[in-house]
Image (cartoon, rainbow, N blue to C red):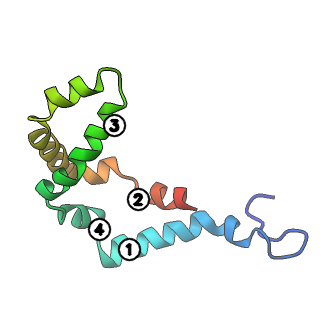
Amino acid sequence: APGVPYGVFGWEGVVPCKTEKMADRLVHIVTGRLLTVEEAFGRIDPHKLTKILIPIVEAELLQEKYGEWWVRVLHPFLPVLLTRVVSNLQRDIESILDLKSVVLSAF
Protein backbone atom coordinates (compact mmCIF):
# COMPACT_ATOMS: atom_id res chain seq x y z
CA ALA A 1 0.00 0.00 0.00
CA PRO A 2 1.28 3.52 -0.75
CA GLY A 3 2.82 5.18 2.27
CA VAL A 4 3.34 1.85 4.04
CA PRO A 5 7.06 1.07 3.91
CA TYR A 6 7.05 -2.56 4.99
CA GLY A 7 6.95 -5.35 2.45
CA VAL A 8 7.13 -9.11 2.60
CA PHE A 9 10.53 -9.10 4.29
CA GLY A 10 9.88 -6.06 6.43
CA TRP A 11 12.26 -3.33 5.16
CA GLU A 12 12.06 -3.15 1.37
CA GLY A 13 10.28 -0.01 0.37
CA VAL A 14 11.25 2.07 3.40
CA VAL A 15 13.45 4.48 1.44
CA PRO A 16 11.23 4.62 -1.70
CA CYS A 17 8.20 5.21 0.50
CA LYS A 18 9.91 8.14 2.22
CA THR A 19 11.60 9.64 -0.88
CA GLU A 20 9.28 12.60 -1.28
CA LYS A 21 9.41 13.47 2.41
CA MET A 22 13.22 13.15 2.46
CA ALA A 23 13.58 15.26 -0.69
CA ASP A 24 11.31 17.93 0.77
CA ARG A 25 13.41 18.07 3.93
CA LEU A 26 16.65 18.17 1.95
CA VAL A 27 15.43 21.06 -0.21
CA HIS A 28 14.15 22.91 2.87
CA ILE A 29 17.46 22.51 4.71
CA VAL A 30 19.61 23.48 1.74
CA THR A 31 17.55 26.47 0.61
CA GLY A 32 16.50 27.59 4.07
CA ARG A 33 19.74 27.28 5.97
CA LEU A 34 22.57 27.08 3.46
CA LEU A 35 21.98 28.72 0.12
CA THR A 36 18.91 29.70 -1.87
CA VAL A 37 18.58 28.81 -5.53
CA GLU A 38 18.64 32.53 -6.34
CA GLU A 39 21.90 32.99 -4.42
CA ALA A 40 23.53 29.97 -6.04
CA PHE A 41 22.47 30.81 -9.58
CA GLY A 42 23.23 34.49 -9.01
CA ARG A 43 26.88 33.62 -8.37
CA ILE A 44 27.30 32.27 -11.88
CA ASP A 45 29.11 34.65 -14.22
CA PRO A 46 26.86 34.91 -17.32
CA HIS A 47 29.85 35.46 -19.61
CA LYS A 48 31.70 32.38 -18.33
CA LEU A 49 28.59 30.23 -18.61
CA THR A 50 28.04 31.55 -22.13
CA LYS A 51 31.53 30.40 -23.14
CA ILE A 52 30.66 26.92 -21.84
CA LEU A 53 27.25 26.87 -23.54
CA ILE A 54 28.25 28.06 -27.03
CA PRO A 55 29.88 24.77 -28.13
CA ILE A 56 27.00 22.79 -26.65
CA VAL A 57 24.37 24.89 -28.43
CA GLU A 58 26.31 24.71 -31.69
CA ALA A 59 26.65 20.92 -31.40
CA GLU A 60 22.88 20.65 -30.90
CA LEU A 61 22.23 22.92 -33.88
CA LEU A 62 24.45 20.74 -36.04
CA GLN A 63 22.07 17.83 -35.36
CA GLU A 64 19.22 19.74 -36.99
CA LYS A 65 18.36 20.02 -40.65
CA TYR A 66 20.55 22.76 -42.17
CA GLY A 67 22.54 22.76 -38.90
CA GLU A 68 25.78 24.00 -40.42
CA TRP A 69 23.94 26.93 -41.93
CA TRP A 70 22.29 27.76 -38.58
CA VAL A 71 25.64 27.63 -36.79
CA ARG A 72 27.22 30.01 -39.31
CA VAL A 73 24.28 32.42 -39.12
CA LEU A 74 23.85 32.37 -35.33
CA HIS A 75 27.50 32.14 -34.23
CA PRO A 76 28.08 35.93 -34.15
CA PHE A 77 24.92 36.43 -32.08
CA LEU A 78 25.20 33.52 -29.65
CA PRO A 79 27.44 35.24 -27.07
CA VAL A 80 25.03 38.17 -26.67
CA LEU A 81 21.93 36.00 -26.86
CA LEU A 82 23.11 33.39 -24.36
CA THR A 83 24.44 36.02 -21.94
CA ARG A 84 21.04 37.70 -22.02
CA VAL A 85 19.26 34.37 -21.49
CA VAL A 86 21.47 33.52 -18.48
CA SER A 87 20.94 36.98 -16.98
CA ASN A 88 17.17 36.65 -17.39
CA LEU A 89 17.26 33.19 -15.82
CA GLN A 90 19.17 34.61 -12.85
CA ARG A 91 16.40 37.14 -12.26
CA ASP A 92 13.56 34.62 -12.53
CA ILE A 93 15.16 31.33 -11.46
CA GLU A 94 12.68 30.69 -8.63
CA SER A 95 9.73 30.78 -11.04
CA ILE A 96 11.52 28.55 -13.59
CA LEU A 97 13.31 25.95 -11.48
CA ASP A 98 11.47 23.78 -8.99
CA LEU A 99 14.35 22.41 -6.90
CA LYS A 100 12.14 19.89 -5.13
CA SER A 101 11.14 18.35 -8.47
CA VAL A 102 14.77 18.22 -9.56
CA VAL A 103 15.77 16.46 -6.35
CA LEU A 104 12.84 14.03 -6.59
CA SER A 105 13.69 13.17 -10.19
CA ALA A 106 17.19 12.14 -9.05
CA PHE A 107 15.70 9.38 -6.90
**Sooner in the amino-acid sequence: mark 3 or mark 2:** 3
User: Marks 2 and 4, how far apart in space?
Assistant: 10 Å
Among the 4 quarters of the image, the one containing residue 68: top left
Quadrant where the C terminus sits is: bottom right
Q: Is residue 76 left or right of residue 23?
A: left
**Closer-to-camera residue (28/15):** 15
Residue type at tag 3: Glu
Q: Which residue is mark 1?
A: 30
User: Marks 3 and 2, how far apart in space?
Assistant: 26 Å
Badge 3 marks a residue whose secondary structure is helix
Name the spot of residue 22 as percent of width and height, x first. 56, 71
Q: Are circles 2 and 1 on residues that touch, CB within 8 Å?
A: yes
Q: Which mark is residue 36?
A: 4
Q: Which residue is mark 3?
A: 60
Quadrant where the N terminus sits is: bottom right
Residue type at tag 1: Val
